[in-house]
Image (spheres, rainbow, N blue to C red):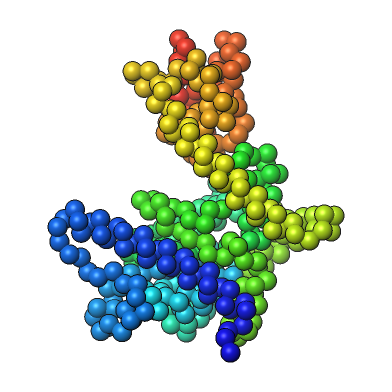
Amino acid sequence: MGPHPAVAAIRLAVRRVLHDILTEHSRTTAGRTSESGTTESRTTGDPGAFDDPPHERAQSPLVLVACSGGADSMALASALAFEAPKLGLRAGGITVDHGLQPGSDLRADEVVLRLRELGLDPVESTAVTVGREGGPEAAARDARYAALDAAAERHGALAVLLGHTRDDQAETVLLGLARGSGIRSLSGMAAVSGGPGAARRYRRPFLQLDRQTARKACMVQSLPVWDDPHNADPAYTRSRLRHEGLPALEKALGKGVVEALARTAQLSRDDADALDAWAGQAEAAVRDAAGLLECAKLYALPPAVRRRILRRAAIEAGAPAGSLFARHIEEVDRLITGWRGQGAINLPGKVVAQRQGGRLVIRQG
């Protein structure tokens, strides 16, 4: 008799991601070997790899799981602990203590203990200081990812697994819709995303699984989980959406809203990727010999492509991507499509955009 369906589902999702990670690692290793003309340490990936002697096993590639102790990340940690050794991978874990609740340090220690009981190694807890920029949720997210990036670099991990589910994806799409954001925001979270110097560091195996499946997997495996009170606190936008907004939508529109929103995210991501690629190819053609953007050539582009070029130029000039909103780009776009001699546009990061002699100049003010 096989495992419970919920356990089988989470393990399959993780197994697929680990295979992808190993395939990419094998290609990278083969590329380095061919360039240097030397043979590097064997890339694992066969079921017998975990039978290597301990001194060789220590060199096996490492995959980390980010774990808060909640049902989603504990289910993910359990699946990683089960699947990684069969593929010759080491499995480790990290929990981030945001310091936002009394006793958070003790709770982080408990998570470390649970991860070690699952057989993960290395395992560590990292305390962070959460700032205020962008609001409490965004500030906590920025601090968390900075800590995860640092841990991945420190341990030389191939990837960091995150426990976001299909429900999280649906919430992200609705939040983007409420902000009036563009198609990139509506595309939600990517199954694969990057960190500094690692374009494919973060993997989200559970984006096609619902939150209930992860919780059920924990229950049937007798895994203790911690329910973060912030997830039920109406002071947080995502919490209100989770406990009030989505249930109201399902009541009005029927079941299947979460699945439809997750499907919208994937379709939007495909479109956004195509438009990004188009903008990347078009950008060189709208710059003059000095590298300045030519307004007449920008005007001839479709708005979706043109605005992507403008956003990229603003970020390259020093505007923080997280603080650069659609309304900022729309104002810059008017320097091209609605030119009436207006003055410079102030952007986040002390960046200024202005039209000069038929050229669009975006630079630090």
**Which residue occupies 27% across, 82% down?**
52
Q: Position of residue 360 (x, y in %)?
A: 47, 19
**Which residue occupies 46% across, 59% down?**
202
131 shown above or below 79: above
Q: Quadrant of residue 25?
A: bottom left
Q: Position of residue 38 (x, y in %)?
A: 15, 61
**Which residue occupies 58% across, 73% down?**
9
Q: Residue furthest right?
A: 252
Q: Residue furthest left?
A: 37
Q: Quadrant of residue 293?
A: top left
201 shown above or below 294: below
Q: Position of residue 41 (x, y in %)?
A: 22, 69
- Of residues 75 and 52, the one nearer the viewer is 52
The N terminus appears in which quarter of the rendering? bottom right
The C terminus appears in which quarter of the rendering? top left
Q: Is residue 13 visible to us here?
A: yes
Q: Quadrant of residue 271?
A: top right
Q: Is residue 128 visible to us here?
A: no
- Of residues 362 and 186, the one nearer the viewer is 186
